[in-house]
Image (cartoon, rainbow, N blue to C red):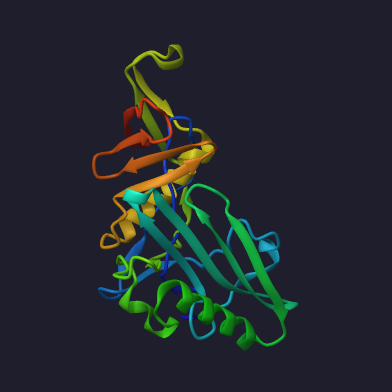
Amino acid sequence: YPLCALAVSDERPVSTQSTWGKSTAKKKHETKKSSEMLISTGKPLVDEHFEQAKSHEVYCEDSVYDAMLNMRNAEKNIDKFYILQVLKSTKGFVFHTRWGRTGTKGQIKTLGPFKDHKLAVEQFEKKFKAKTGVSWLAKASLLGKANPNTKKYSVLRVNYAPPSNGVIWQYFVDDGVDGKKIGWYDYSVDGSAEVEKVWQQYQANTSANLGVRHVQTGFWVYEVDFRKMEQTNLGHHARKRRSIRRFIR
């Protein structure tokens, strides 16, 4: 099979909040190829925020040039992502990057198009090593694990399986906030989708220390604890903690 048809993983971020909502969940129809790699059916997805996504595809001739990186430090309230991709179209090849705080769109930079894929791959490998501290060929040493160098990004496995529309994230209200009765309430559509992304990362990268995430949404930063299934608004003086759940309709 070509690499893009049976893709070797690398992965993607997120968060939660009491005003977030309905999710586009990602199922994991994956099988382990080794302790370091994950394989899933489906083609690698072009970054959703790349403006020309419909006319491009991830380049994966001799390797799947798609990487999702994450850096986090709970004590310093740091939780950042970095996406790197080599993309192919009829016009040539581009090196695409997007980075920022988890839960935000972040910043985007694209180089190209290049006629020769080697030029885009060269930029990809150079940036990957600068952000992780290891070469692209040695990525398996970090895949799915926390980077021992805390000043560098970890390399996450990517789940390429198609999304499911049957998952929604919810939070529990027991204090009458905004006149709400006691019970479970849906996140916003965008919020739920973000939390589902992070949840899938947590599930696919058990050694990457992703059990607690700090995610920004609007003016607020939420701490999402998947181990306790709780969220805390770190930006609010009350620092209210609420129970959360992943609900399958």
Look at the picture and state if 227 lies above or below 34. Answer: above
Query: In which quarter of the view is residue 142 placed?
Result: bottom left
> Could you say which is closer to the camera, residue 78 or residue 33?
78
Q: Please tell me which residue is depicted at 61% across the width and 69% down the height of the picture.
A: 96
Task: Give the quarter of the figure containing the C terminus.
Answer: top left
Q: Residue at x 30, y 65 (%)?
A: 146
In this orientation, does residue 4 appear? no
Residue 223, quarter of the rendered image: top left
Residue 125: x %, y % from top left: 51, 81
Q: How many marks?
A: 0
State left or right for residue 166 relative to residue 224.
Answer: right
- Measured from the top left, where is residue 61 in percent x and y? 54, 84
Asked if residue 167 is positioned above or below residue 27 in the image, the reply reads: above
In the image, is residue 184 above or below residue 87? above
Q: Is residue 110 left or right of residue 105?
A: right
Q: Position of residue 84 (x, y in %)?
A: 53, 69
Q: Is residue 90 visible?
A: yes
Residue at 25 percent across and 73 percent down: it is 35
Measured as percent of width and height from the top left, residue 200 is found at 37, 53
Left or right of residue 35: residue 196: right
* Depth order, front residue of 42/78: 78
Task: Compare residues 125 and 170 and report the one nearer the observer.
Answer: 125
Question: Does residue 55 lie above or below 15 as drawn?
Answer: below
Residue lying farthest to the right in this orientation: 91
